[in-house]
Amino acid sequence: MKNNFPIFKNNPELVFLDSAASSQKPQCVIDAMTETMENYYANIHRGIYPLSQKSTKKYEEARNKVANFINAKEISEVIFTKGATESINLIAQTWGKANLKQGDEVIISILEHHANIVPWQILEKEIGIKVKVITCNNAGELDFNNFKKLINSKTKLLSLSGMSNVLGIKTDIKQFINEAKKHNITTIIDACQLIVHEKLNVQDLDCDFMVFSAHKLYGPTGIGVLYGKYHLLENMPPYQTGGDMIKRVSFEKGTTFNTPPSRFEAGTPAIVEAIGFGSAIDFLNKIENQNYKEQKLTQKIIKILTNIDGVKIIGKNQCGIVSFTTDWGSPEDVATLLSHQHIAVRIGHHCAMPLMEYLNIPSGTIRVSIGVYNDETDIDKLEKALNKCKEMLS
């Protein structure tokens, strides 16, 4: 699999274990983006010349690939954004301001990335809503009974991560969505990490919104997805204004806005990135038995960490992501020594400060995360390198 990724050819000693932050790019994605810029790049929509028509076709084909990838009911339910962060902010500033009022309650969880915390805190100040937080148990699993206790007549929204970017633990999002629906609660799923490790079907899940980013799915940065049920999208006001999201602008009669998805894609979009994202989805669709491979490698990571004295693994039942601390070195010291041995990991709070505070880990964790290009040899090198770190720091 590594031979599909030029980064490893150009950095033959690299052991990349930071895919949860951002994944490496296969040659096919690089080629698709280069081909676009070299052969047929032009601004999309409305151009009647061949370059613009081909760019438009490829851009909308990418949207169709995303819709099929998540089994959206309609292509127009897929909106391209800059990433999951913008997607959540878009929902908060459009659906949120149109549907939430003072005293309404929004439920999130202790596991959330800051991108799914701060937008709701801002609405707390601007509108007067209340944010409530689902706790987790010692294994890092969300407490479903706690969630049910938080629900009342004022609860209007559940915005939940499908998988912790810190702990690598999946949430039974179907269970939470089903419970929310009993109370007419709108649901948002932050699928940034989950969609990398599990095939998702939005119609089966029946979530109202889902967000994720291309760069974690072996696509480029600067582009992500907001999926929303069409009846919700068509009743949401625009997030930003400009070209392509309007039907008509008049000084006398004002402005009328386009239908989704155009309404939410103001200005010149990330054309090249969208086409690259489409290629990444083609790449992912060809991979077989990836879940089995990921589970096997995850278990091997847990095994080697368990066998090193002074290492504490945070959480249980991980998939693709394992966080840990050591009693013989700070995260920064360990990561620095690993880097000197050509091993890339992530350290710190991982944009999840409330979770770190909850777990009483003020210095953060060392996080190992795998991608399709990792193999058992990489984990063997990690084991050897960590033992060397322990030797040097003890």
Image (spheres, helix red, strand yellow):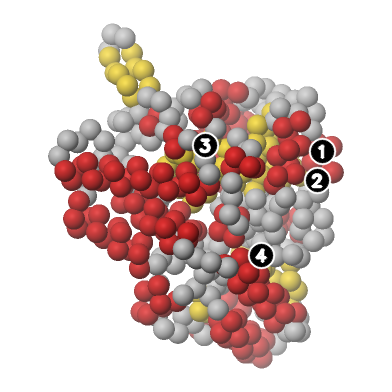
State the CA–CA distance, disc 1 to disc 3: 29 Å
Amino acid type, residue under disc 4 in the picture: Cys
Q: Which numbered disc covers residue 148?
A: 1
Q: Marks 1 and 3: CB-CB under 8 Å?
A: no
The spot of residue 347 in percent (x, y) is 59, 68
Q: Marks 4 and 3: CB-CB under 8 Å?
A: no
Q: What residue does disc 4 label?
A: 319
Amino acid type, residue under disc 2 in the picture: Phe
Q: Residue at x 15, y 39 (%)?
A: 49
Q: Residue at x 84, y 43 (%)?
A: 145
Q: Nearer the viewer, mark 1 or mark 3?
A: 3
Quarter of the figure with the C terminus: bottom right
Amino acid type, residue under disc 3 in the picture: Lys
Who comes first in sequence, dot 1 or dot 4?
Answer: 1
Q: What residue does disc 3 label?
A: 73
Give the SS element for disc 2: helix
